[in-house]
Amino acid sequence: MTARPLVSLVTGAGSGFGALTARALARSGHTVYAGFLQSHDDKSSVYRDAANFARDNNCQLRGIQLNVVKDDSIKRAVDKIIADEGRIDVVVHNAGHMNFGPAEAYTPEQFMEMYDVNCLSCQRINRIVLPHMRQARTGLLVWISSSSAHGPSSPFLGPYFAAKAAQDSLAQTYAAELTQFGIETSIVVPGVFTKGTNHFATAMKAGDAAVEHEYMEGALKGWDRICAEGHSNIVSPDADPGAVAEAVRRVVDTEYGKRPFRVHVEFDGGGATIVNGVRDLVRETFLTKLGLAELLKVKISK
């Protein structure tokens, strides 16, 4: 556990990794704001479920409306957290949206939407949160990436994979640029999880039905089923989305200045750990050659 409870904002906390992460952090003693797309006024149970969890576990878990593709929604949420707590110590960039279908059948506008949720939302949040962290000269950004960003990838998920690769690259850039402000970066890399999240159930459908038909009822007929079944078959029976939440909790609970740059949570044997190990070593070596080695380690204010 860290020296003091940390004020944390988890995006996309209504289900899946986000909901589990928010609860894991709250259970560990942190004050957690769980970002929900839904408002307090609708009939969604997410706020009630969060309040019940906080009561039953005697912890600080608070739902807050947060639409990660709307600047005004992000600002309202961050302003409330700052007003209530005086600071934000941790942001978990978890909000995301998946697709399943042939890439050509997705319109450019759909690609933009995919990038908006999975990558640009992080930029929106950073621009509103980071001024507070930079002023405090401390903070932590946790990015929920994907093993597909630089590791194994399959057909029918192209827009999602492209957006997650962009997010991962953005996280690496921020990591170097923020160390001298005392702000740490940790990238958590989940592998394939076919149960316990709603990624597949809510996956974006292709917008061009005619093109999709040419693929899925033509040359690639049946291959989408084989791909989906293959994902299920390669995942270990022990695969639990809660392991991703626990990985985030361990990162947050690690002593400031000693948090890992990247953590993998794989149950599929995909090998992203190997690929990213090489990539991160190349990154460190290159920055060192450029004379930027100091940017690889967080600067701790006295």
Image (tube, helix red, strand yellow):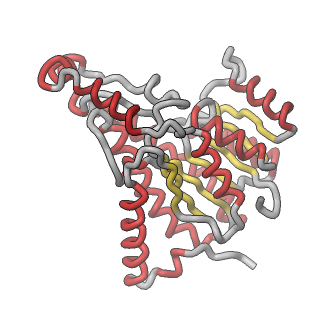
Location of residue 179 (image quadrant): bottom right
Q: Residue furthest left?
A: 219
Residue 127 location in percent, x, y?
56, 53
Residue 167 location in percent, x, y?
43, 50
Up/down of 228 relative to 60, above or below: above
Q: How many marks?
A: 0
In the image, what residue occupies the spot 72% across and 46% down? Answer: 25
Question: In the picture, which quadrant includes the C terminus?
Answer: bottom right
Of 175 and 131, nearer the camera is 175
Location of residue 47 (image quadrant): top right
Up/down of 82 relative to 154, above or below: below
Residue 73 seen anywhere in this rendered image of the structure: no
Up/down of 239 relative to 228, above or below: below
Residue 165 location in percent, x, y?
37, 50
Q: Residue furthest top?
A: 43
- In the picture, measured across the screen, residue 291 lies left or right of residue 205, that is right
In the image, what residue occupies the spot 53% across and 57% down? Answer: 263
Residue 46 location in percent, x, y?
69, 25
- In the picture, measured across the screen, residue 249 lies left or right of residue 267, that is right
In the image, what residue occupies the spot 24% across and 17% down? Answer: 209
In the image, what residue occupies the spot 82% across and 60% down? Answer: 4
Of 205 and 264, nearer the camera is 264
Location of residue 27 (image quadrant): top right
Residue 111 seen anywhere in this rendered image of the structure: yes
Question: In the picture, which quadrant includes the N terminus?
Answer: bottom right
- In the picture, measured across the screen, residue 229 lies left or right of residue 208, that is right
